[in-house]
Image (cartoon, rainbow, N blue to C red):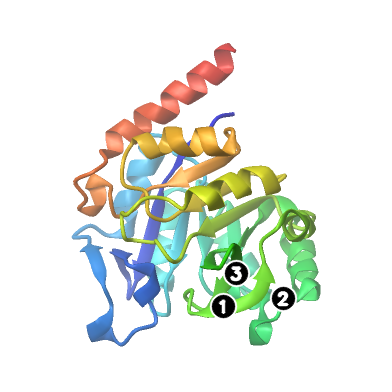
Amino acid sequence: MPTLFRPCIDLHNGQVKQIVGGTLDSAEQDLKTNFVSSHGPVYFAELYRKDQLVGGHVIKLGGGNDEAARSALAAWPNGLQVGGGINADNAMHWLEAGASKVIVTSWLFPDASFSEERLKQLSQLVTPQRLVVDISCRRRGDSWLVATNKWQTVTQFELSKDSMSLLASYCSEFLVHAADVEGLCSGIDEQLVKALGEWSSIPCTYAGGAKALSDLDLVNRLSEGKVDLTIGSALDIFGGDKVKFEDCVQWNIQQQTSSCSS
Protein backbone atom coordinates (compact mmCIF):
# COMPACT_ATOMS: atom_id res chain seq x y z
CA MET A 1 0.00 0.00 0.00
CA PRO A 2 1.41 3.44 -0.89
CA THR A 3 1.62 6.41 1.48
CA LEU A 4 -1.76 7.55 2.80
CA PHE A 5 -2.96 10.71 4.52
CA ARG A 6 -3.64 10.16 8.23
CA PRO A 7 -5.84 12.67 10.08
CA CYS A 8 -5.34 14.00 13.60
CA ILE A 9 -7.18 15.69 16.45
CA ASP A 10 -4.77 17.54 18.74
CA LEU A 11 -6.34 18.51 22.05
CA HIS A 12 -5.08 21.24 24.38
CA ASN A 13 -7.14 22.40 27.36
CA GLY A 14 -10.12 20.54 25.91
CA GLN A 15 -10.03 22.34 22.57
CA VAL A 16 -8.91 21.24 19.10
CA LYS A 17 -5.75 23.18 18.35
CA GLN A 18 -2.70 23.25 16.11
CA ILE A 19 0.39 24.19 18.12
CA VAL A 20 4.03 24.78 17.28
CA GLY A 21 5.41 21.63 18.89
CA GLY A 22 8.59 23.13 20.26
CA THR A 23 6.65 25.58 22.45
CA LEU A 24 4.36 23.04 24.12
CA ASP A 25 5.88 23.25 27.58
CA SER A 26 6.12 27.04 27.52
CA ALA A 27 4.23 29.34 29.81
CA GLU A 28 0.77 29.99 28.41
CA GLN A 29 1.74 33.43 27.09
CA ASP A 30 4.69 31.91 25.19
CA LEU A 31 2.76 29.03 23.67
CA LYS A 32 2.62 29.45 19.89
CA THR A 33 -0.78 28.38 18.61
CA ASN A 34 -1.50 28.28 14.89
CA PHE A 35 -5.18 27.50 15.20
CA VAL A 36 -7.97 27.06 17.73
CA SER A 37 -11.09 25.43 16.30
CA SER A 38 -14.60 26.70 16.89
CA HIS A 39 -15.64 23.07 16.44
CA GLY A 40 -15.31 20.44 19.13
CA PRO A 41 -13.50 17.13 18.62
CA VAL A 42 -16.74 15.32 17.71
CA TYR A 43 -16.99 17.44 14.55
CA PHE A 44 -13.62 16.20 13.32
CA ALA A 45 -14.25 12.59 14.35
CA GLU A 46 -17.48 12.59 12.39
CA LEU A 47 -15.75 14.22 9.41
CA TYR A 48 -13.07 11.53 9.35
CA ARG A 49 -15.69 8.82 9.82
CA LYS A 50 -17.71 10.10 6.86
CA ASP A 51 -14.67 9.85 4.61
CA GLN A 52 -13.44 6.59 6.18
CA LEU A 53 -10.04 8.04 7.10
CA VAL A 54 -8.92 5.24 9.39
CA GLY A 55 -5.85 5.28 11.60
CA GLY A 56 -6.09 8.90 12.69
CA HIS A 57 -4.76 9.88 16.09
CA VAL A 58 -6.30 11.85 18.94
CA ILE A 59 -3.48 13.35 21.01
CA LYS A 60 -4.06 14.78 24.48
CA LEU A 61 -1.47 17.53 24.91
CA GLY A 62 -1.41 17.81 28.68
CA GLY A 63 -4.22 17.59 31.22
CA GLY A 64 -7.83 18.64 30.89
CA ASN A 65 -8.42 16.71 27.68
CA ASP A 66 -9.93 13.40 28.79
CA GLU A 67 -13.57 14.39 28.28
CA ALA A 68 -12.82 15.84 24.84
CA ALA A 69 -10.92 12.71 23.84
CA ARG A 70 -13.72 10.44 25.01
CA SER A 71 -16.26 12.41 22.98
CA ALA A 72 -14.19 11.96 19.81
CA LEU A 73 -13.81 8.22 20.39
CA ALA A 74 -17.53 7.86 21.06
CA ALA A 75 -18.27 9.60 17.76
CA TRP A 76 -16.28 6.97 15.88
CA PRO A 77 -15.77 3.82 17.94
CA ASN A 78 -12.69 1.87 16.83
CA GLY A 79 -11.92 4.46 14.17
CA LEU A 80 -9.34 6.54 16.02
CA GLN A 81 -6.20 5.97 18.06
CA VAL A 82 -5.58 7.88 21.29
CA GLY A 83 -2.36 9.06 22.92
CA GLY A 84 -1.18 11.37 25.68
CA GLY A 85 -0.56 10.10 29.19
CA ILE A 86 -1.17 6.46 28.27
CA ASN A 87 0.19 3.88 30.73
CA ALA A 88 -0.54 0.39 32.02
CA ASP A 89 -3.12 1.72 34.47
CA ASN A 90 -5.35 3.51 31.95
CA ALA A 91 -4.70 1.84 28.58
CA MET A 92 -7.62 -0.59 28.82
CA HIS A 93 -9.94 2.25 29.81
CA TRP A 94 -9.17 4.04 26.55
CA LEU A 95 -9.69 0.92 24.47
CA GLU A 96 -13.02 0.37 26.21
CA ALA A 97 -13.87 4.03 25.49
CA GLY A 98 -13.63 3.28 21.77
CA ALA A 99 -9.99 3.73 20.75
CA SER A 100 -8.83 1.35 18.04
CA LYS A 101 -5.31 1.51 19.50
CA VAL A 102 -3.51 3.29 22.31
CA ILE A 103 -0.38 5.34 21.66
CA VAL A 104 2.35 5.33 24.31
CA THR A 105 5.51 7.40 24.62
CA SER A 106 6.60 9.18 27.82
CA TRP A 107 5.60 6.32 30.15
CA LEU A 108 8.15 4.10 28.39
CA PHE A 109 10.94 6.48 29.41
CA PRO A 110 10.98 6.91 33.21
CA ASP A 111 13.72 9.38 34.12
CA ALA A 112 14.35 9.74 30.36
CA SER A 113 15.61 6.13 30.13
CA PHE A 114 13.90 3.49 27.98
CA SER A 115 12.18 0.69 29.90
CA GLU A 116 11.72 -2.45 27.83
CA GLU A 117 10.01 -3.98 30.84
CA ARG A 118 7.27 -1.34 30.75
CA LEU A 119 6.82 -1.82 27.01
CA LYS A 120 6.56 -5.58 27.45
CA GLN A 121 4.01 -5.11 30.25
CA LEU A 122 1.80 -2.82 28.18
CA SER A 123 2.11 -4.99 25.08
CA GLN A 124 0.96 -8.05 27.00
CA LEU A 125 -1.91 -6.09 28.52
CA VAL A 126 -3.43 -4.64 25.34
CA THR A 127 -1.78 -6.98 22.75
CA PRO A 128 0.70 -5.72 20.15
CA GLN A 129 -2.11 -5.35 17.62
CA ARG A 130 -3.66 -2.53 19.68
CA LEU A 131 -0.48 -0.74 20.65
CA VAL A 132 1.26 2.14 18.87
CA VAL A 133 4.67 3.32 20.08
CA ASP A 134 5.22 7.06 19.68
CA ILE A 135 8.88 7.68 18.93
CA SER A 136 8.58 11.38 18.25
CA CYS A 137 12.05 12.84 18.14
CA ARG A 138 14.43 15.75 17.88
CA ARG A 139 17.46 15.92 15.64
CA ARG A 140 20.86 15.95 17.28
CA GLY A 141 23.59 16.17 14.67
CA ASP A 142 23.02 13.31 12.23
CA SER A 143 20.84 11.39 14.67
CA TRP A 144 17.27 11.50 15.94
CA LEU A 145 16.65 11.04 19.65
CA VAL A 146 13.23 10.24 21.13
CA ALA A 147 11.69 13.26 22.89
CA THR A 148 9.13 12.82 25.67
CA ASN A 149 7.03 15.01 27.97
CA LYS A 150 5.44 17.13 25.25
CA TRP A 151 8.70 16.81 23.27
CA GLN A 152 10.68 18.78 25.85
CA THR A 153 12.79 15.96 27.35
CA VAL A 154 15.31 14.56 24.87
CA THR A 155 16.28 11.02 25.80
CA GLN A 156 19.37 9.08 24.75
CA PHE A 157 17.22 6.60 22.80
CA GLU A 158 18.40 6.91 19.21
CA LEU A 159 16.22 5.89 16.28
CA SER A 160 17.90 3.23 14.17
CA LYS A 161 17.05 0.00 12.38
CA ASP A 162 18.03 -2.01 15.46
CA SER A 163 16.16 0.11 18.01
CA MET A 164 13.00 0.22 15.89
CA SER A 165 13.21 -3.53 15.33
CA LEU A 166 13.26 -4.03 19.10
CA LEU A 167 10.20 -1.81 19.58
CA ALA A 168 8.36 -3.41 16.66
CA SER A 169 8.33 -6.77 18.41
CA TYR A 170 5.92 -5.30 20.97
CA CYS A 171 3.60 -3.12 18.87
CA SER A 172 1.85 -2.89 15.50
CA GLU A 173 2.61 0.68 14.49
CA PHE A 174 4.84 3.72 15.03
CA LEU A 175 3.89 7.39 15.27
CA VAL A 176 6.73 9.85 14.71
CA HIS A 177 6.40 13.60 15.15
CA ALA A 178 9.47 15.49 13.99
CA ALA A 179 9.28 17.87 16.96
CA ASP A 180 11.76 20.38 15.51
CA VAL A 181 9.46 21.19 12.57
CA GLU A 182 6.06 20.34 14.08
CA GLY A 183 3.53 23.10 13.36
CA LEU A 184 5.93 25.24 11.32
CA CYS A 185 4.67 24.36 7.81
CA SER A 186 8.29 24.69 6.72
CA GLY A 187 8.63 21.34 5.02
CA ILE A 188 9.05 17.78 6.22
CA ASP A 189 12.29 16.31 7.53
CA GLU A 190 13.12 14.41 4.34
CA GLN A 191 16.08 12.55 5.80
CA LEU A 192 13.99 11.29 8.69
CA VAL A 193 11.18 10.13 6.40
CA LYS A 194 13.67 8.24 4.22
CA ALA A 195 15.25 6.66 7.30
CA LEU A 196 11.87 5.60 8.67
CA GLY A 197 11.08 3.91 5.37
CA GLU A 198 14.33 1.97 5.61
CA TRP A 199 14.21 1.17 9.33
CA SER A 200 10.57 0.40 10.11
CA SER A 201 9.25 -3.13 9.59
CA ILE A 202 5.71 -2.15 10.65
CA PRO A 203 3.31 0.64 9.59
CA CYS A 204 4.63 4.09 10.46
CA THR A 205 3.05 7.55 10.41
CA TYR A 206 5.16 10.70 10.17
CA ALA A 207 3.98 14.17 11.26
CA GLY A 208 5.75 17.51 11.16
CA GLY A 209 6.25 20.36 8.71
CA ALA A 210 3.96 19.24 5.87
CA LYS A 211 3.05 22.27 3.76
CA ALA A 212 1.66 21.02 0.44
CA LEU A 213 -0.44 18.22 -1.03
CA SER A 214 2.68 17.21 -2.95
CA ASP A 215 4.26 16.23 0.37
CA LEU A 216 2.15 13.06 0.20
CA ASP A 217 3.87 12.13 -3.05
CA LEU A 218 7.24 13.17 -1.61
CA VAL A 219 6.81 10.93 1.45
CA ASN A 220 5.62 8.13 -0.82
CA ARG A 221 8.79 8.38 -2.90
CA LEU A 222 11.21 8.88 -0.01
CA SER A 223 9.83 5.97 2.04
CA GLU A 224 8.89 3.77 -0.93
CA GLY A 225 5.29 3.87 0.30
CA LYS A 226 6.13 2.55 3.75
CA VAL A 227 5.37 5.74 5.73
CA ASP A 228 2.03 7.56 6.00
CA LEU A 229 1.75 11.33 6.47
CA THR A 230 -0.23 13.51 8.86
CA ILE A 231 -0.87 17.10 7.75
CA GLY A 232 -1.91 19.54 10.48
CA SER A 233 -1.46 23.30 10.46
CA ALA A 234 -1.30 23.56 6.65
CA LEU A 235 -4.76 21.99 6.30
CA ASP A 236 -7.79 24.16 5.57
CA ILE A 237 -9.91 22.47 8.27
CA PHE A 238 -7.31 23.71 10.75
CA GLY A 239 -7.20 27.25 9.42
CA GLY A 240 -4.41 26.60 6.92
CA ASP A 241 -4.32 27.86 3.35
CA LYS A 242 -1.85 25.39 1.84
CA VAL A 243 -3.69 22.06 1.65
CA LYS A 244 -7.37 21.24 1.13
CA PHE A 245 -8.76 18.46 3.27
CA GLU A 246 -10.86 17.21 0.35
CA ASP A 247 -7.72 16.83 -1.77
CA CYS A 248 -6.22 14.58 0.92
CA VAL A 249 -9.37 12.47 0.91
CA GLN A 250 -9.12 12.15 -2.87
CA TRP A 251 -5.42 11.22 -2.62
CA ASN A 252 -6.32 8.29 -0.36
CA ILE A 253 -9.10 7.15 -2.67
CA GLN A 254 -6.74 7.23 -5.66
CA GLN A 255 -3.98 5.33 -3.83
CA GLN A 256 -6.35 2.69 -2.51
CA THR A 257 -7.99 2.26 -5.91
CA SER A 258 -4.69 1.90 -7.74
CA SER A 259 -3.39 -0.49 -5.08
CA CYS A 260 -6.46 -2.73 -5.44
CA SER A 261 -6.24 -2.75 -9.24
CA SER A 262 -2.53 -3.54 -9.40
Q: Hey, what amino acid is under mark 1?
A: Val
Disc on res. 231: none
If the image is split into quadrants, where does the C terminus sit?
top right
On the picture, is 191 further left or further right than 163? left
Can the viewer see residue 3? no
- Pointer 3 residue: 146
Q: Position of residue 45 (x, y in %)?
A: 37, 49
CB under 8 Å between discs 1 and 3: yes
Q: What residue is disc 2 on?
A: 114
Res 131 visible: yes
Residue lying at 75% horizontally and 56% vertically, measured from the top left: 127
**Image-quadrant location for residue 41:** bottom left
Say left or right for 99 vs 18. right
Q: Give the mark, 3 or 2, whose residue is nearer the N terminus.
A: 2
249 versus 258 height, above or below: below
Check contact, mark 3 vs mark 2: CB within 8 A.
Answer: yes
Question: Label 3 is placed on what type of residue?
Answer: Val
Q: Distance of mark 1 from mark 3, alpha carbons?
A: 6 Å
Image marks 2 and 1: residues in contact by CB distance under 8 Å: no
- Between residues 95 and 234, which one lies in front from this camera angle? 234
Query: What's the CA distance linking mark 3 and mark 2?
Result: 10 Å
Question: Mark 1 or mark 3: which comes first in sequence?
Answer: 3
Say which of 100 and 212 sits in front.
212
In the rendered structure, find residue 154 and report the number of the disc placed on it: 1
Q: Secondary structure at mark 2?
A: loop
Give neighbour class at mark 2: few <14, some 14-19, many 20+ (Cα, 10 Å): some
Which sits in the foreground, 16 or 168?
168
Secondary structure state at the residue bearing disc 3: strand
Amino acid type for the residue under numbered disc 2: Phe
How far across and down, in percent of the image, does residue 87 sit?
64, 74
Picture coordinates of residue 258 (x, y %)? Answer: 51, 17
